[in-house]
Image (cartoon, helix red, strand yellow):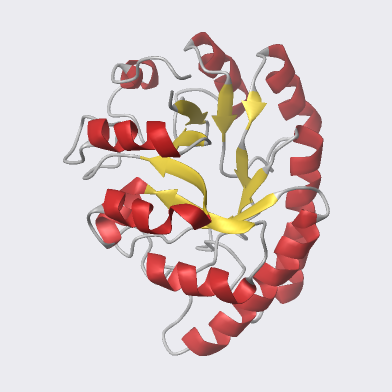
Amino acid sequence: MNKFAVNLSTIFTEVHFLERFKKARDCGFSHVECQFPYHNTKAEIQRELSLNMLSLELINLPPGNWVKGDRGLAADPKRVDEFKQSVHIGIEYAADLNVSRIHCMAGIIPNGEHDIARDVYLNNLHFAGTEMAKHGIMLLIEPLNPYDMPGYFLHDIHQAKEILDVVDLPNVKLQFDFYHMERIHGNPLSLFQQYANIIGHVQIADVPGRHQPGTGEMNYKEIFHYLNDIYEGYIGLEYTPSGKSEASFDWLEGGK
């Protein structure tokens, strides 16, 4: 049976972040994920996880200054030290909150700096993967589509596969978001089948709109049927609800 983890950064945004854990439990979920937990202390988050009997499956590394336009630090040649600090912060949160997966955002890269950014990205991923392996944590990279994230360094699944081959660490894997794959390449289920052996986490949203399954063009019935037989991990619900969050789970039957 497919298993789902609700993303507390994109769902239940009607309430404060710490209140979303109870919302998830009230809607029947036992597993959650989030993007950036760092505005709250580890103790605050652990309290909400414990009170609501939830497991936190995934977080992101600190992305830099999001308000000023940062979308990750890993491919930025000028911020290697800051990136390494972010790795240690992410590991501290993951270790204390029993999180087994961390997504590392690559960042926005100016035109003309792709080659040097690639070298920096490879070195930073190797550093992060090595450090996370000491704590039994999987490091994830995810291609993001250029419509939602213009200038993002990692923007193609084949590029991601080549980078993973070079980094060549067993705990560094691909985060496969069906929404982004549909927008970048189309036919995401075929891509999943092609790259299943390097996928460490799955996320979903429908196209267009990035809302819940059933609101757009994607055939999630077929996708879930396939994943049910081959994918053992949690499927992250990283969508923006169309309407109230609680009403966005009407498509979901079991598997929470």
In the figure, is residue 222 to the left or right of 240? Answer: left
Marker count (numbered): 0
In the figure, is residue 202 to the left or right of 123? Answer: left
Name the one closer to the observer, 112 or 15: 112
- Residue 240: x and y, percent? 36, 35
- Residue 5: x and y, percent? 51, 29
Residue pictured at 35% horizontal, 52% vertical: 193
Name the one closer to the observer, 57 or 111: 57
Give the position of the N terminus as an image quadrant: top left
Q: Quadrant of residue 127?
A: bottom right
In the figure, is residue 147 to the left or right of 202? Answer: left
Residue pictured at 55% horizontal, 81% vertical: 118
Q: Quadrant of residue 49?
A: top right
- Residue 182: x and y, percent? 27, 53
Residue pictured at 55% horizontal, 72% vertical: 165
Of all residues shown, which one is farthest toward the top? 26
In the figure, is residue 112 to the left or right of 21? Answer: left
- Residue 89: x and y, percent? 77, 52
Of all residues shown, which one is farthest toward the front? 229
Q: Is residue 4 above or below residue 115?
A: above
Q: Is residue 154 above or below residue 247?
A: below
Question: Does the image show residue 44?
Answer: yes
